[in-house]
Image (cartoon, rainbow, N blue to C red):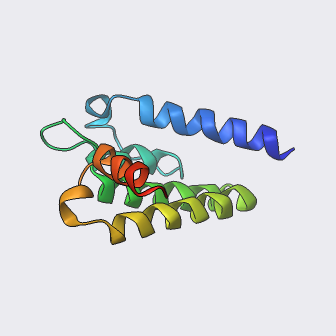
Amino acid sequence: NMNGMYTIFTIGLLLILATPIYSLRGVQQSKTPMSSLAHSFEPVLSNEEKYLNVAELLDACWDFSSVLYKIGHTTLARDFDNNIRKAEALYNSAPSNQRQSLSSLLRLERESGI
């Protein structure tokens, strides 16, 4: 059931994103596909911890997609890939002063009517 998969995916993604980044620092890397995700999302929060770094977030999302493929969720991974590509297109088309943080990028998206 696709709705069930989307629900599970959404919950998993929210759990990953809701985990405070500082709590992931120093986590030992093990050999499971999911273990690398903590390290992938670690640099997403800026050094000043004031905003989410979009470039790092996109990289971490690609890592997440890779894990989805590895654990056999191909359909979900393809859908996620399409969403990442859309976000990257917006990121790449945005002026540099409007693409550093997620909030400024979302504001640009809303203002441009995308």
The image quarter containing residue 19 is top left
The image quarter containing residue 95 is bottom left
> Which residue reaches farthest right?
1
Q: Residue at x 71, y 43 (%)?
A: 6
The image quarter containing residue 58 is bottom left
Q: Residue at x 54, y 39 (%)?
A: 13
Q: Quadrant of the N terminus?
A: top right
Residue sitting nearer the eye, 80 or 94:
94
* Residue 24 percent across, percent down from the top left: 32, 34
* Residue 90 percent across, percent down from the top left: 41, 64
Residue sitting nearer the eye, 12 or 54:
54
* Residue 82 percent across, percent down from the top left: 60, 65
Q: Residue at x 44, y 48 (%)?
A: 37
Position of residue 91 relative to residue 6, above or below, is below
Residue sitting nearer the eye, 83 or 7:
83
* Residue 22 percent across, percent down from the top left: 25, 31
Marks counted in the figure total 0
Q: Is residue 81 left or right of residue 109?
A: right
Position of residue 96 relative to residue 48, above or below, is below
Instruction: Specify whether residue 40 is in view.
Output: no
Instruction: Specify whether residue 19 is in view.
Output: yes
